[in-house]
Image (tube, rainbow, N blue to C red):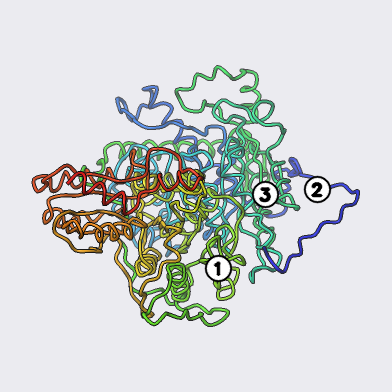
Amino acid sequence: MVRQIKSTFECKKDRLNFKTIPVCSYQKTIEDEIKQKSLTRERALFLLEQMYMIRALEDMLSQIKGGMYKPLKGFSYVGPTHLSIGQEATSAGSISAIGKGDYITSSHRGHGDAMAKGANMIKLLSGQELKDLLSRRKIYLDAIGEAVSDDDSREELEEKAMKVHTYRMIAELFGKAHGYCRGVGGGMHIADFELGHLGANAIVGGHVPIANGAAMSVRYKNEDAVVLCLAGDGAFSNGVVLESLNLASMAQFKNGLMKNRHGVPIIFGIVNNQYAMSGQCRGETTGIDFLARRAAGFDTDLMHAEVVDGMNILAVSDSVERARKIIRSGKGPVLLEFMTYRYKGHSLSDPLTYRDREELAAWRERDAISTFEDKIKNAGFVEGKVTEKEIETLKKKVYDRNASMAEYASAADYPEDKSILYYLFSEKEEKEVPKKYANPKTLKKLPGYERDDKGRINARIAVREAIMEEMARDGRVITFGEDIADYGGAFGVTNDLLDTFGRDRVFNVSISEAGMVGAAVGMAMTGLKPIVEIMYNDFIMQALGQIGNQAAKWSYMSGGQISVPMVLRTTIGGGKGYAGQHSQSLEALTTHIPGLKVVAPATPYDFKGLLKSAIRDDNPVIFFEQQLIYNSLGKVPEDEYLIPIGKANVAREGNDITIVCWSYMVEESIKAADMLKNDGISAEVIDIRTLIPLDIDTIAASVKKTGKAIVTAQEVSQSGFMSEVITSIQENVFDWLDAPIQRLGAPNCIPPSAQNLEKLFLPDAEKLAAIIREKY
């Protein structure tokens, strides 16, 4: 719904034409590269060194698993072995073509990508930057018996940095505290956020929306950077990946709807190693010959797609360099398909029974390393020829470096037992907004919302005020979702935001719940504070992978390198006849996932104060808004205030029984308490407000006073958060209980549409009062 765009259609006979997709357009020889001064002797040797580094690392893992790695005799490796042997040119070639400020994301088969990213950053850093990096990483230099001297040459500094890089890579694989993620991430989640590696990902395709969000962040902040997203061929049949291709290609980024006319600066790199575990995309699990054809479904420019020889490191590098130029001209995104091959199975336990030996031999004939060795040996570099001995010396240096760093890593300490819960949540508190983002310009003055004579507004306006105030305070806060811009959201909550802040900060996205949540994760990782709206909480099941495996986990899996400050707003609850897919209360789906904060307020005052705190929090917060509360009136100060997350509220004081509740059932509990007065029962109502973290202290203090407790919510009773509250009461104040704890939730069935059945389904004040009278 955009007024500037007229949606009309004239029915006349025509046909749709598609642009062509180049296949192996790179046909240069190494002599061509030398003549064009795009390949020097030094660069050629460094490209070869990177491929050696990748293969040395993975040869080591393969040999350790077989008990044949001589430097670590008897070492027991516990962890995954998803090797990329054969794919070295794709990793080294693509990453060597990006810049110092650029980002990458990677897959579970990402050792090579991580190794190449670190090596290239070492080369790209200035002398002082390299010294500063080594200074920050002194603990690792000490661990490998190295130190930085003022007399060190550039070459010596680089070698020390390469050793530290290799050491930390291997330490992470071995689960050691000196690993890039302090040993808690492991081989499938290696990340170095300081140097622009936003993480490998064990969920196939799970990192693609994160990369997309990072690129949207770069675009929003007008940074001169690109995001290189490397994912396997299997990922490009995954729903969240296809959602991400669509989100990256949205016309509004380039057609003038947004002030910043610039495409999303992302290169989607399909690392087509011919097998998605054992399934073959060509001829078996898809209906196309090249996955680059996917681009035709998302962009009339076909995302400038190309098919590239992934075994030729120069072809790969050339394609990424050209892609960067396209992106810098504002015409991104770009999709590249690298045709490569992995010699090993999905993991080292894979018997390879589905492969043909002739096929493997044919690919080995084109091995990226050996063919590049031959090319540079025969090349006429201006600086002089590369000799066989030089190549052997380089290879030996790399393999020796890997072996010595493996010895150090194997002897390094594991993380301390007491650290098991470290990094789950970020403890960072930001007192002030950085000057660059403080008090950004708005398109017009913030609207003032009139209070009634008691100082009240409804909860809908309270939410809107919270978002507006935080967006006006902090330019890093943006909001997006389905129909939140011109339409104002399904419940009218986001009205006035578009006119006040503009479409660069308030925009619609396609119906892509997983893609949008993943994008929010990537934005949060790269410096924004996104608010993403999912219309109904029933729809979060479309996005649980991104909520539970990405937003919740990255602070922990990165070893505390990164935080994910984002808010996911969604609505809960029934009472409107919307039935089974628009009426559920699914808070417990998110409370079971460590790493998330979960909030479910009950009053306009709390809606605003808690949402403002959630937006400022340095962690992912799921913010549940009950639809029936939107029209509820409550006193909300116009002056600034915050409500701390994790602090319950005594909504009604009493002495005989404690009612623990949240969201819509707070109002119903207060009504029940009023009813019980006539029976001489004094009920205390505890509105927990925040489910995670749960304020058990306030609950326990009340139960100690009353000796009885009942927990109530609109969720179905089976396996819900009510059970968690009950267990916490039992564990903390069992000796003070005078009777069994009761609960009142919805029956264990699907929310019905029929008015009479829905009334039976939903808990309310009458049912709550009746249980209390019966049981106590």
Q: Nearer the viewer, residue 603 or 10?
A: 603
Establish if 623 lies above or below 61.
below
| Dot 3 crowding, Cα within 10 Å, few <14, some 14–19, many 20+ | some
Numbered-mark total:
3
| Left or right of 755, for residue 595 | left
Residue in view at x 26 percent, y 40 percent? 414
| Left or right of 605, for residue 385 | right
According to the image, label 1 marks what residue? 505
Can residue 164 be seen at all in this image of the molecule?
A: no
Looking at the rendered structure, which numbered label has been put on residue 403? none
Distance from disc 1 to disc 2, alpha carbons, whole Å, reads 33 Å
According to the image, label 2 marks what residue? 19
Q: Amino acid at mark 3?
A: Asp
Tell which tag, 1 or 2, sits nearer the viewer. 1
Q: Amino acid at mark 2?
A: Lys
Establish if 624 lies above or below 636.
above
Can residue 240 be seen at all in this image of the molecule?
A: yes
Residue in view at x 72 percent, y 33 percent? 289
Quadrant of residue 682 within the rendered picture: bottom left
| Left or right of 651, for residue 225 | right
Distance from disc 3 to disc 2, alpha carbons, whole Å, reads 21 Å
Tell which tag, 3 or 2, sits nearer the viewer. 2
Distance from disc 3 to disc 1, alpha carbons, whole Å, reads 35 Å
| Dot 1 crowding, Cα within 10 Å, few <14, some 14–19, many 20+ | many
Q: Who comes first in sequence, dot 3 or dot 2?
A: 2
Establish if 375 lies above or below 483.
above
Tell me, yes or no, whether the two marked residues, 3 and 1, touch with CB atoms within 8 Å: no
Q: Secondary structure at mark 3?
A: helix
Q: Amino acid at mark 1?
A: Arg
Looking at the rendered structure, which numbered label has been put on residue 318? 3
Residue 739 percent across, percent down from the top left: 14, 44
Q: Secondary structure at mark 1?
A: loop
